[in-house]
Amino acid sequence: MPETINVYLGIDLGGTKIAAAAVDVRTGERQVQLVVPTEAHEGPPAVITRIASLVDRVCDQANLRREHVPAIGVGVPGVIDPSSGTTLLLPNLPSGWRGVPLVAEMQRLTGRPTAIINDARAFTLAEAVFGAGRGMHSVVGMTLGTGIGGGIAIDGRLYLGLDGTAGEIGHMTIDPNGAPCGCGNRGCLETFASGPSITAMGLRAVAQGMTTQIGELVEYDLNKITPEIIMRAADNGDGVAREILQRAGSYLGVGVANLITILSPDRVVIGGGVSRLGEWILGPVHAEILKRCHVTPLNRVQVVPAQLGGEAGVIGAAVWAAQTSGTWH
Amino acid sequence: MPETINVYLGIDLGGTKIAAAAVDVRTGERQVQLVVPTEAHEGPPAVITRIASLVDRVCDQANLRREHVPAIGVGVPGVIDPSSGTTLLLPNLPSGWRGVPLVAEMQRLTGRPTAIINDARAFTLAEAVFGAGRGMHSVVGMTLGTGIGGGIAIDGRLYLGLDGTAGEIGHMTIDPNGAPCGCGNRGCLETFASGPSITAMGLRAVAQGMTTQIGELVEYDLNKITPEIIMRAADNGDGVAREILQRAGSYLGVGVANLITILSPDRVVIGGGVSRLGEWILGPVHAEILKRCHVTPLNRVQVVPAQLGGEAGVIGAAVWAAQTSGTWH
């Protein structure tokens, strides 16, 4: 069966759910995709067992024998040690996830070679090979969500840097005297333009009694404020909400402008939940780039939305497995 | 003579002088190096003719026949259009240097294939192949001088981005609301830590009547203030001078921290005139990196001084000629 050797398993391990798919790495097409809750509180062994049985279910439904899967790729939400295949710092999972030998455990349970990769790098790889960056020489990927992740792909391959940490663009300093960031730095891009930072700006506006619909839209249950709620207020003409999104988008634009200045890539591909705020965020990003980038030939840098949606994670993980297991050409 | 095919000519075109050398690109050794004044006011044709006769003199002294030189590389202080081989924006040369077909003219006058490259990229390539970044997977080069230039080398090759503009790190935004920069942006790294920016801080301190030796050291001829003068005052214990260098170094450190966060390189190699301020500048750079980089494995990123001195320019230009003329392995 010569075609099955092109089908790899891609796993996207998230804080709340795990997605797994059989991916044809010649085309990026998924044959089967299944999703289960992570239940991270049960601890790493239970979650890894859940991933392994998910692998079996995907194989079953895709009519694949597990031993015909050349390799499995797992996208992980945080910092990993690629040499040992262990997790280091996964901010969205309980602290017990530090130092988990994920590769060894997956290989023991599935019998298949396993490769792990940061989830934002997996997103970037998928978009560079099959999505909005397809065919481009150089692609910078950005995922805007709870955090701001990223990756750099050159000729369809990830540029990873030391321990795979290249692309940690959320921790670029945008304002040296800015607010403290969870990472230990201050003024990081994440402190201005991540989902929680946008939410916090909405919350502050309501708490300070500003004239805004944001409070009304959540019936003054401030826990319900989200970037989407702020966008709804902005859509309704709310000036405070518009200013919040303008501010987040402008700071994000400073970050994108820096990436363009430093890397001069063909494409910057933006995905993740916050990118669904669309022009409210991307408008100010584009305006800031025009104000700030004067050396790069801006007429040829394209800042574009991601194309693969939420599936980029599993596709990128599968491509990563194919590229690192030596069968990718 | 099989060994002569490894000898390329490297030219470093500067605002005040032109250096040319015959460089063995297997070893990085220069066989002959000559320097003449640029006399940029005479206009591009006269200067290019001067470069061509410099090529002849270097060949003579190196006992090379010009027709045995496989290719010539020219490092250019500014932005170029690599596809047409013309200059675009050379801030340190008169405005007549915009749009000069440097490659075509050099090839017409010398009869040899010619390649051009931004001078900071040439510096980076030389240091990556033969200098402080030798043998490393990824190297970021920085030249601190009148401007702040840079480059990115991966496995001994330049990563260039669109039109060769990757590495324009001097125009990374460090403070979104900072002072205007000549490029059109504001708050660029160059506005904080280039030679002229450091000089301007010294000048301002004297003009504002601060208690500092800086004015005395130049006998109150404010045109004579330079970063070296400020360093001399700092060496003498001058608090104002120390604060100026501390401030420049800290902002430079924010820029270096951003490069490390984004690229996670094995080495950051720092050269150029301002880097001769040594620990006065590099001390605060290191302190800032420690404060700001918490994801990259900092114990393995090395921020080091350049090793090739002022010769990196000609060596890098020669290596660039070798790599682009297809004889480099």
Image: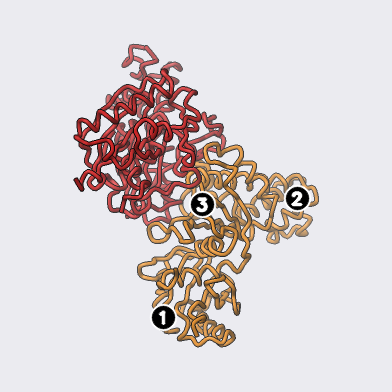
Chain colours: A orange, B red
Visible residue check, residue A139:
yes
Q: Secondary structure at mark 1?
A: helix
Q: Residue at x 79, y 47 (%)?
A: A237
Say whether disc 2 or disc 3 marks the residue closer to the N-terminus.
Answer: 3
Q: Position of residue A233 (x, y in %)?
A: 76, 52
Residue type (three-letter) at the residue carrying disc 1: Gln
Q: Chain of mark 3?
A: A
Q: Residue at x 54, y 49 (%)?
A: A189
Q: Position of residue B146 (x, y in %)?
A: 40, 28
Q: Are marks 2 and 3 on the same chain?
A: yes
Q: Secondary structure at mark 2?
A: helix
Disc 3 to disc 1, C-alpha distance: 36 Å
Disc 2 to disc 3, C-alpha distance: 27 Å
The front one of B172 and B241 is: B172
Q: Position of residue A279 (x, y in %)?
A: 70, 50
Q: Secondary structure at mark 3?
A: loop
- The residue pinned by badge 1 equals A107
As drawn, the label of residue A164 is: none
Q: Residue at x 23, y 43 (%)?
A: B24
Q: Chain of mark 1?
A: A
Relative to B149, residue A209 above or below: below
> Do callouts 2 and 1 mark residues in contact (Cβ within 8 Å)?
no
- The residue pinned by badge 3 equals A181
The front one of A99 and A144 is: A144
Residue type (three-letter) at the residue carrying disc 2: Ala
> Do callouts 3 and 1 mark residues in contact (Cβ within 8 Å)?
no
- The residue pinned by badge 2 equals A234
Residue type (three-letter) at the residue carrying disc 3: Cys
The front one of A10 and B123 is: B123
Say whether disc 2 or disc 1 marks the residue closer to the N-terminus.
Answer: 1
